[in-house]
Amino acid sequence: MRLAFTAALLLVTFIQTVQAQTTPRKETDRWFGGNLCLNDCTRHRAGYRWALETGVNSYEDCPQFEEKSFLIGCRVYVDDPHRDPDFDDDDRLIRKR
């Protein structure tokens, strides 16, 4: 069951990545790790920081109960543990709430 869930989660992530790469970018869009932020990327940053502080090593270590943006931020950490979580993909500061 867990394997099927993980496979489905990876498929959804792949589809979202393809959609993000083929979706025309607007100047006002904010992106974090190749993922479109619906608001201001603060939840993506929170998931990334949580993963950093917790020592996450794989997607399976990310909390499945959290909201989508938090989960994506955790996955971005797995893929790119050396980025600066305080900036979006265009090097714009993610403001603290």
Image: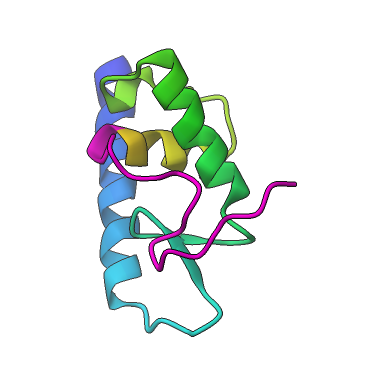
Question: Quick one: quadrant of the N terminus?
Answer: top left
The x, y position of residue 35, in whole percent, is 40, 58
Above or below residue 79? Residue 55 is: above
The x, y position of residue 55, in whole percent, is 36, 15
Tell me, yes or no, whether the highlighted magenta stretch contains residue 94.
yes
The kind of secondary structure the magenta stretch mainly shows is loop
| Left or right of residue 37, residue 24 in this image | left
Camera-side residue: 31 or 82? 82
Q: Is residue 64 visible?
A: yes
The x, y position of residue 84, in whole percent, is 39, 45
Q: Is residue 1 visible?
A: no
Q: Residue at point 58% right, 55% down?
A: 94
Residue extending farthest right = 97
Number of marks = 0
Camera-side residue: 15 or 91? 91
Camera-side residue: 51 or 83? 83
Tell me, yes or no, whether the highlighted magenta stretch contains residue 21.
no
Q: Residue at point 28% right, 70% down?
A: 21
Above or below residue 68? Residue 51 is: above
Magenta residues, as a range?
Answer: 78-97
Above or below residue 51? Residue 47 is: below
| Left or right of residue 94, residue 6 in this image | left
Quadrant of res 19: bottom left
Coloring basis for residues: rainbow
Q: Residue at point 48% right, 84% down?
A: 26
Camera-side residue: 71 or 94? 94
The x, y position of residue 67, in whole percent, is 59, 37
